[in-house]
Image (tube, rainbow, N blue to C red):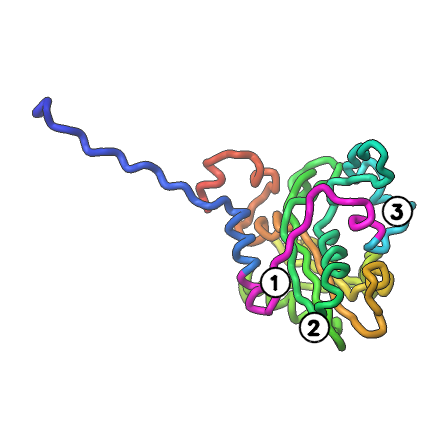
Amino acid sequence: MNPEAKSAPKTPAKGHLHPMTQIIREIQTVFGELGFEVADGPELETEHFNFDALNVPADHPARDMQDTFWIKPLKGSQERPVLRTHTTSVTARALAECKDQFPIRKIFLGKVFRNEATDITHEAQFFQLDGVYVDKNVSLADLKSTLLYFYKKILGDDVEVRFRPSYFSFTEPSAEVDVKFKGKWLEMMGAGMLHQNVFKAAGVDPDLWCGFAFGGGIDRLLMVKYGIDDIRSLYSGDLRFVNQF
């Protein structure tokens, strides 16, 4: 071999988007087809928008330390900051900020935080999708058709989806939405018609407007889409896992 011959330059390995980023972009595209706009809100939230404006009672267990990361208030402030426990807090903000712009269709995607133990389907920090549609003459049929369209687009036409009655303080009536995953039903999100008290807290007349809201974990959506067994794999930093997507 000629010692003066130069070796061929190595092609650097190409990076790619994390599977979480990929599915967030896919979600935005699907809801964009239905006329939903993307909005955002702070991860360090106020107690008002995280709980009060969503009709969550002052003695509700979700406010306890075992579920919520409370942050020490600033000196002289009576407002207790909180790491948002759901992106539904952005729903409350959107209702208050856009009440003069109705009708609206918006989705919110981002990190949320829960002070709880982790396991194969739960994390203390995870990503959540929330959405809200406010107009006149909105019904549960509109909610169901919207979510069925979404799940079929993301998970395929053969996905099995069920709606069952439930309770949430900010919707009435309320429903849990499950999909079939490895032969068992897996809870994916909560949904329902916006409660009158949520409209009133935002300064909106519930006799003039109505709407639906929904929210659920994006992590579980990834689990179902790709058959992931352990939700914690998404945050392990293990390139052997990430490079599969």
Seen in the picture, residue 61 relative to 162 is either above or below; the reply is above
Sequence-first tag of 1 and 2: 1
Q: Which amino acid does label 1 sit on?
A: Glu
Vertical relation: 92 (above or below) 204:
above
Residue at left offset 70%, top offset 71%: 103
Q: In the structure shown, which secondary structural element does the residue marked by tag 1 occupy?
A: strand
**Mark 2 near mark 3, Cβ–Cβ under 8 Å?**
no
User: Is 22 left, or right, of 62 in this rendering?
Assistant: left
Residue drawn at x 43%, y 44% is: 16
Using a 10 Å C-alpha cutoff, classify the residue at mark 1 as few (fewer than 14 neighbours), some (14 to 19) or many (20 or more). some
What is the secondary structure assignment of the residue under circle 3? loop
Instruction: Tell me where residue 137 appears, x and y as whole percent.
Output: 76, 77
Residue 125 in which image quadrant: top right
Q: Is mark 2 on a helix, strand or loop?
A: helix
Q: What is the three-letter code of the residue carrying label 3?
A: His
| Residue nearest the viewer, comparing 218 with 76 | 76
Residue underneath mark 3: 60
What span is colored magenta in the figure?
A: 29-52
Q: Name the residue at the right extreme.
A: 59
- Say which of marks 3 and 1 sits in front: 1
The CA distance from mark 3 to mark 1 is: 31 Å
Q: Could you tell me residue 134's position as x and y percent?
A: 73, 68
Mark identifier at residue 37: 1
Residue at the location (72% across, 59% down)? 94
Q: List x then y, in percent, for residue 182.
A: 60, 52
Q: Which of marks 2 and 3 is nearer the N terminus?
A: 3
Tag shown at residue 142: 2
Residue 40, magenta (yes or no) = yes
Query: What amino acid type is highlighted by mark number 2?
Result: Asp
Q: Residue at x 53, y 48 (%)?
A: 21
